[in-house]
Amino acid sequence: MNKKAIALMSGGLDSTLAVRLIVEQGIDVVALNFKSPFCLCDGSHSDGCKTHAMKAAGETGIEIKTIHKGLEYLDVLRNPKFGYGSAVNPCVDCRIFTFKSAKKYMEETGASFIITGEVLGQRPMSQRRDPMFTIEREAGLEGLILRPLSAKLLPPTKPEIEGIVDREKLLSIQGRSRKEQIQIADDFKIEDYPCASGGCLLTDKKFGAKLKDSFAHKDELGWGDVKMLTLGRHFRLRDDAAAVVGRNEDENRRIAVIGKKGMLLSPDGFSGPTVYLDGACDDEMLELAGSLMLKFSKADGKTEYSISYQSNDKTGTFTATKPLSEEELDRMWLR
């Protein structure tokens, strides 16, 4: 083995500390940051976790590479071998996917092992002993994943056994409290770690309901479909048609940018939301989507409202006359 490691770096407190502990031992570390639309670390930055990971890597003086999870990751979400958590979060399968990707990069760069900021007992699905060892085995990395924050509570890894890493300088943290990590951060003079507890949209049950609905009704999803799930109010109009209704001006704009595969509806001469119609766009669905638009519009008492529609192959206008009923709304709303 050599003194080169690949670090999984989210930009959060735990991964930042794990990297610092290994760099302090003279190990050459290259960080990997995995990017997906599901990170909730910091909505104030367009790049979310990536922004904080790059900042943390820069302050530690190490190289960092960003890897975008490809469409094959959506296959993992659709059919996780080890199942979901409380929502649509396949945490064990997600870690296996991530470690397999890291393993490829480790082999490409000639590194010998991988480090992570995982803490024993911190997360119920993927950070218990049995799942940790299952993940290592499934990823083909048995003995090669070093978890510096909890290392003394786990069997020695190969870099520890071979003396590449001094086990005595590693830690024995466990559980959900971050008091010890915060104290160590103070010792290292590490400040500004806004993603200390992480965050994943897949653990949100409301988002999970929308994603499961898409899996149930669409054979293939792209990242554009996933991004659309993060916007607006979602409705299942029919087995072959769904609609998204913008909640504000910013969402209306973003829906219009992302919604190129389906049909976009916009109010003509009155104040109302943008509606994205995905799937069947026949007259019945247009009428239903128009009623949905009126339900969330500032109607001024007129009996008819003109609505414009546009897709890749057709444009036009139609007239809507009445908002969707409360009963129909409740039946269709994915919430």
Image (cartoon, rainbow, N blue to C red):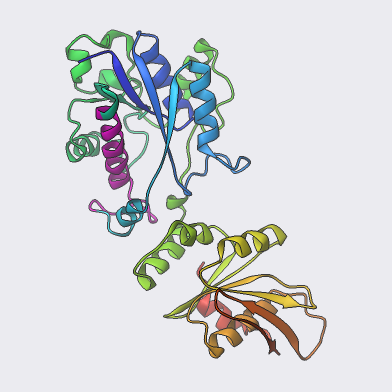
Is there any visible trace of residue 327 in the rendered image? no
Position in image of residue 299 (x %, y %) = 78, 79
Q: Residue at x 75, y 85 (%)?
A: 305
As drawn, 67 above or below 293: above
Is there any visible trace of residue 82 in the rendered image? yes
| Residue that lies at the very extreme toward the front in this rendered image | 313
Position in image of residue 46 (x %, y %) = 59, 43
As drawn, 288 above or below 203: below
Asked whether 87 falls inside the magenta stretch, the response is: yes
250 sits to left or right of 261: right
The magenta span reads: 81-107
* Residue 310 figure quarter: bottom right
Q: Quadrant of the N terminus?
A: top left
Position in image of residue 177 (x %, y %) = 44, 29
Q: Residue at x 29, y 25 (%)?
A: 109
- Using the image as rendered, state which of residue 265 and residue 300 is in the foreground: 265
* Residue 172 figure quarter: top left
